Image (cartoon, rainbow, N blue to C red):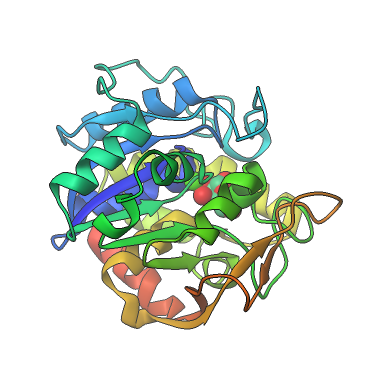
Amino acid sequence: MKLIIDTDPGIDDAMAIAYAAAAPEIDLIGLTTVFGNTLIDQSSRNARFLLDKLNLTVPVSQGASWAWGRDSHRASVHVHGPEGFGDVTDIPDLGKNHHMPAAEYLVEMARCHKGQLTVCAVGPLTNIADAIALDPAFSSNLARLVIMGGAVFCRGNVTQHAEANIHNDPIAAQSVFDRPPETVLVGLDVTMQTLYQGSDFDALAKQSPDFGGFLRDISDFYLRFYQDIADQDGCGLHDSTAVIACSHEDMFETVETGVRVVQDGPSVGRTVPDPNRPAIKVCQDVDAVGVVNLFTERLSSLP
Ligand code: BDR
Ligand code: CA
């Protein structure tokens, strides 16, 4: 399966990219970056660093710096650390970004790999909305769009009602949900079931001392955040769960519904089922043990 991950790395983004690198059924053809967990330049720097560490020579195409209707963005330093990788800092600036901006690159790749390309969006939906706006054929050229975002039947994480990726660009999110390609929404409804604990990272680091060890080091910060805000032992494998849904849809139970995104007020960013909008597949349950085991098994094969 040809895959592009649209990402804001980010601790759990790093896990998802590593999963894609390790999964034999996935042909990762590139990364597109977006603001979100970090500022955009840091997202791209982190993406290039991860690819280098994973020995992958695929392009990083840089995308949006901030949300539709805004002109700045603040990084989620309290969740992902000062540079997006928790306590690990001074990430080297390796290589260069692809010459095409993300929306153009997505449109071009969807055209080149017509009907074969899956895009997994694990950050704010700004680049995806830009690509849909740029080329009317983009949606039909894609095989599928899989989104980590939303909290349709459960509580949010960034506020009581909203999930972070949708909250970071609610206008772009609505624009995608109103003109969706074939779409699967992997929200907190399922990603708060696929939890990874400190002991899981320790075990992974034994199997994969280099990359697994790096994931353990960056995740300490993330685990402390979960413990402090939610009194929860373990972090959600948010973005990895979405990448796993790209190739293992049978591990998820979905319901078809349109989705409305609340645009203002205290519930801004909330994702509400709306039968009057185009239907997409919304994940409402998951084989959480299966997903976590698959994640561990695949990542254990990394050096
Ligand atoms: C999502 O928000 C980001 O902080 C994570 O990387 C993930 O994509 C979870 O709500
Ligand atoms: Ca992310």
Q: Say whether residue 303 is visible.
A: no
The image quadrant of residue 104 is top left
Q: Position of residue 85 (x, y in %)?
A: 48, 33
The image quadrant of residue 151 is bottom right
Q: Residue at x 62, y 62 (%)?
A: 233
Report the side of 92 relative to 227 (left or right): left
Query: Residue extending furthest front?
Result: 136
Report the side of 71 relative to 176 (left or right): right
The image quadrant of residue 250 is bottom left
Q: Position of residue 219 (x, y in %)?
A: 50, 44
Q: Say whether residue 268 is visible.
A: yes
Quadrant (top left, top right, bottom left, bottom right) of the N terminus: bottom left
Quadrant (top left, top right, bottom left, bottom right) of the C terminus: top left
Q: Residue at x 49, y 25 (%)?
A: 40
Q: Position of residue 239 (x, y in %)?
A: 44, 55
Report the side of 21 relative to 122 (left or right): left
How many numbered tags mark residues here? 0
Q: Position of residue 54 (x, y in %)?
A: 21, 38
5 vs 203, nearest the viewer: 5
Q: Residue at x 57, y 60 (%)?
A: 234
19 vs 262, nearest the viewer: 262
Q: Residue at x 79, y 59 (%)?
A: 160
> Is residue 134 depicted above or below 110 in this figure?
above
